[in-house]
Amino acid sequence: MKVAVVGATGMVGEVMLRILLERNFPIDELLLVASERSIGRNIQVGGREHMVIGMEQAVKQRPDLAIFSAGGDTSLKWAPEFAAVGTTVIDNSSAWRMDPSKKLVVPEINARVLTKADKIIANPNCSTIQLVMVLAPLHHKYKMKRVVISTYQSVSGTGVKAVKQLENEMAGIEGEMAYPYPINRNALPHCDVFMENGYTKEEMKLAREPQKILDDRTFSITATAVRIPTSGGHSESVNIEFENDFDLNELRKLLHNSPGVVVQDNPDTNTYPMPVFAHEKDEVFVGRIRRDETQPNSLNLWIVADNLRKGAATNAVQIAEYLLAERLI
Ligand code: A2P
């Protein structure tokens, strides 16, 4: 396999390279691709030096697979160029997610929709991935009507510049700002840009992407997305109203038996998911599972995952692994 990692110098790109190595993804030739600013830079991957190349050069090399984490504009412009030379693109940006002709995939849930004809495949938003990993098994069993979610999102989701802003603020150093306000000792109810309806783009991704992944528009999701000064993972407070009633023990067992989901839930021992536990892990952690006592068939829970791993790089590599295993690339 000739594999290109596009955005190799970025926050997700770095984790992507690590995960490809960790999971022994079969790579014969690795292309590290970034913007013109980085061309010629050397990066160590698995003890070997690789020189960063630009987009045009990477397309000319016709890789079998290109994993993109270089922002929406780069994907919109370049993913079709790679697809045109026969490369299968897995794209981490929001550029193609809601395009009806592109598949939006969380392998544990809907990998079966993928075919050989899919040349640009979208990786969902980080907050969406961890949410649907928990919602999917519950929806199949109890049928969701409405979900209300509030997120507590890590600065690493914004990229290198935001992590630097937090580090600078903690050290008392003036520097470049990724956010319109300080993030240290703060909570910004503002992830991604504002839309005309008053919601942020991140909130609308959370509302729409799960319906596409679950191929079901009969339930609705409303969200408030908040950036907080953590770096290990995103957390989500989730309230779900189901059509059908549930038994809490049975529901816990269902989540316990769901691949990629770990239940951490014991108030007696202060056991619940937190970013410091989820950091560097590939699983999605769920806890604080309790009945919403204000209305029938309703549930509250708390979901945490490492947004750079399952929320981005791990999910993309799992898609690539599925394509390989099913001989779709
Ligand atoms: P570069 O380092 O050369 O700017 P992050 O979100 O962590 O800031 O990372 C963004 C990634 O996307 C980086 O690897 C960055 O490369 C890459 N990137 C940004 N703009 C482009 C572009 N126009 N073409 C290719 N890669 C880009």
Image (cartoon, rainbow, N blue to C red):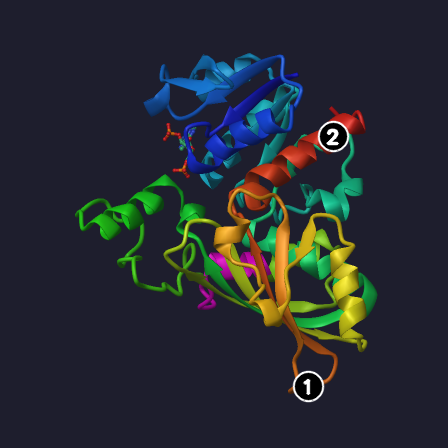
Whether residue 188 is situated above or below residue 160 in the rendered picture: below
Question: Which residue sits furthest bottom?
Answer: 294
What is the secondary structure assignment of the residue under circle 2? Answer: helix
Q: Is mark 1 within 8 Å of ligand 1?
A: no
Q: Residue at x 69, y 42 (%)?
A: 101
Instruction: Tell me if mark 1 has few (under 14), some (14-19) or many (20+) residues whose alpha carbon lies within 10 angstroms of its own.
Output: few
Q: Which residues are magenta?
A: 196-206
Whether residue 65 is situated above or below residue 210 in the rendered picture: above
Residue bearing mark 1: 295
168 or 47, which lies in front? Answer: 47
Residue bearing mark 2: 323
**Residue 141 is a magenta residue:** no
- Of the residues shown, which amino acid type is indicated by label 2? Leu
Q: Residue at x 51, y 61 (%)?
A: 203
From mark 2 to mark 1, how far is it between C-alphas?
43 Å
Q: Which x, y percent locates residue 156?
A: 42, 46
Name the image quarter holding the C terminus: top right
Q: Is residue 301 left or right of residue 203?
A: right
Of marks 2 and 1, the one in the foreground: 1
